[in-house]
Every structure is written in C-alpha cells, then in structure tokens.
Amino acid sequence: MDAFAQFLQAKYALDQRSLNPVVWRRFLNELSGRTPLDLLDVGTGTGSMFRRILQHYDHGAMRLSGLDIESGLLDIAEKEIIDLLQAKGFAVENGAGRLCAVNDEDRIEFQRVCTPLTDFRSVPNCFDIITAHAFMDLVSLQQTLAGFYSRLKPGGLFYATINYDGETVLFPPYPDSEFEDALLQAYDASMEARRLNGSETGGAKCGRRLYEELLNAGFEIVSYGSSDWNITPCDGAYLDDDHIVLDRLLGWIYSEGRINPSIDLKKLDRWLECRRQQRQKRMLGIIVHQIDVLARKASRVSHEENTAWMF
C-alpha cells in the first residue's frame, strides 16, 4: 500500500468523527424509500463513502459506481466493500471490475470506474445520489456541478463532505506566530492557485463556494454545516490513527512552504522540527475547518438533460 493510500485509510475514523451529524442524519433519512438506489461516488479512493453507507443503510437494493483515477485505490475499495458485505451476511461474486452481493432480501452491485471525472460519460437522469468526499476542492465547481445536475434523476441528491474552507489552526501557539501565519497563508494560496485544464477549482474556500455554486446550478440546499477535523491529544494519546494524518498535514504544509519564494527556508526547517517534536511528545493539535452540504436537484428542466453529458 502506497503512502497516499495509507493516509486515506488512516483518516477514515477521523472523517467519521468529523462528519456533520445533522447533515449526515438528513442524508440517511433521504435514502429511505429510494430502492433500487443508483449511487455514483466520485473520487472514491479506498471506498470510505460506500463503506459508511453500507454500514448504516440496512435494507434495499443498490447499484454503486465508484469513480477514481487510481486503480490501486479502487482495488483497496473493492476489497473493503467485499469484506464489509461478507461480514453482513452477503454472498459475494466478483469479476471483471464488478461485484454482486446478495442475501435473502437485497442485492448490491458495485462497479469500479477507473477514469478521470472529465472523461466519464453517462446518460442524463441516471443516478439517485452522487457523493463526493474531500474531492470538490480539486475540480471546477461550475462545470462539475452542471454535470452532476444533468446526471441526477429528478429529486436526486448531491452529498459533498469534508470540503476544506480556508482555515488551519495549530496549537500550542508557535513562538514565531508571524512566520506560521505567513506559512499557513502560503498553504491556502497554493490551493487557490490550483487549476484543472485551465479552470479554477474549488480551492481553499471550497466549502463556502459550494453553497453559491449549487444554487447557481439549480440545486436546493437541504442541509449544510461544519465538519472540522479536530486532532487533539487527550490523556497523552491521539485518537485512532490521527497521528498519521497530522504528520501528513505537516509534510504538505512544509512542502508548499519550500516552493514559495516568500518563505524563509531556515525558519521553515526550524518550524517543521519544532512541530514534529511536539507531535512525537503528543503535545501538538490541529483544527482544520471544513463544511458538509446536502443538496437536491430542483425540478427545473434544461436542454442539457436531453443529451448525454461529458464533464
């Protein structure tokens, strides 16, 4: 398992603790009665969203499509889904990028789709649900949401979770607070500068931008709220695998500082050494501000829905 896959697996419990509980409960309530359920998950990674849904959604036929550009991550997602379904008493058959799981009442199908979102094709009005976990900051919001709107059935739902929203706070305070403030600003600026095929992406303030862009795309906001990561040592220990996530975040912040000409590299090295020592001593904490949103496809009809859509 490569380093990024290890990071995704390490943050599973943290993400579960961090999901906005009001938005999550509303999402689960909205699933009720939608059977069979056709669900597309973009940026599937190791299958965290599917695993959460399967753990909490006890009854009903489902057809799941998991899209990611990394086949190795989809391999892990597939294995995790198989293990979960077998633990729930399903008989699982797997082959040719598809798996089918059945028990006495339900049938669950999973299809892996290894392709960039921009190359993914499907007919309009084909999904009940589209989910995106820690993904929307990487893509063009306007273009992507237009594509999601086209693909959703009337009344279909879009559930986007762990959307970064422009604030990272480390504690205890760093002695050179002015330097750390500048470093974190450079970290956010790197996300703001990110482009995909020449288009702006959701960036460092993706959470708040999603609200407006969803309305512009014709969605109705069903529920919305914060889903902050809180990685804080308690009783001398980090929860779950939070220490792995924290170390990865420090590495990302440091890497962005290295390529920013306004950051003093000697000060940057001292900063990393200090913060990693604090992490090793279980003294370092971090809060990362994020937002979850659940939206519904409004009833308007547009000409795009009469044609197949490619992002």
Image (spheres, rainbow, N blue to C red):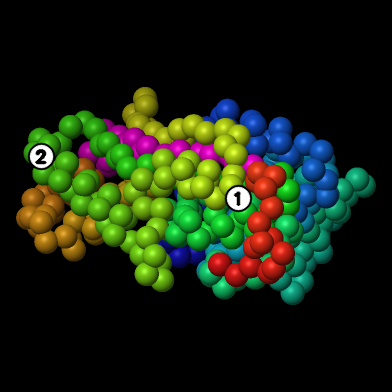
Q: CA distance from mark 2 to mark 1?
A: 38 Å
User: In this view of the protein, can residue 280 be seen by the observer?
Assistant: yes
User: Mark 2 or 1, which is nearer the eye?
Assistant: 1
The question of residue 120 being in magenta is answered with: no
Q: Is residue 292 magenta?
A: yes
**Left or right position of 254 against 286:** left
- On the image, the x and y values in percent for residue 284 come to 27, 36
Q: Amino acid at mark 1?
A: Thr
Asked if residue 85 can be seen in this view, the reply is no
* Label 2 Cα crowd, 10 Å radius (few <14 / some 14-19 / many 20+): few
Label 2 sits on a secondary structure element that is helix
Task: State the image coordinates of residue 224 (x, y, percent, origin top left).
Answer: 52, 33
- Check disc 2 and report the residue beneath it: 178
Give the image location of residue 145, x and y in percent.
54, 54
Residues at circles 2 and 1 in contact by the CB criterion of under 8 Å:
no
Residue 138 lies left or right of residue 77; in this view the side is left
Residue at left offset 36%, top offset 45% = 205
Q: Can you name the residue that lies furthest to the top here?
A: 235
Under mark 2, the amino acid is: Glu
Which residue bears the numbered disc 1? 131
Give the residues drawn in magenta, as a range. Answer: 278-296
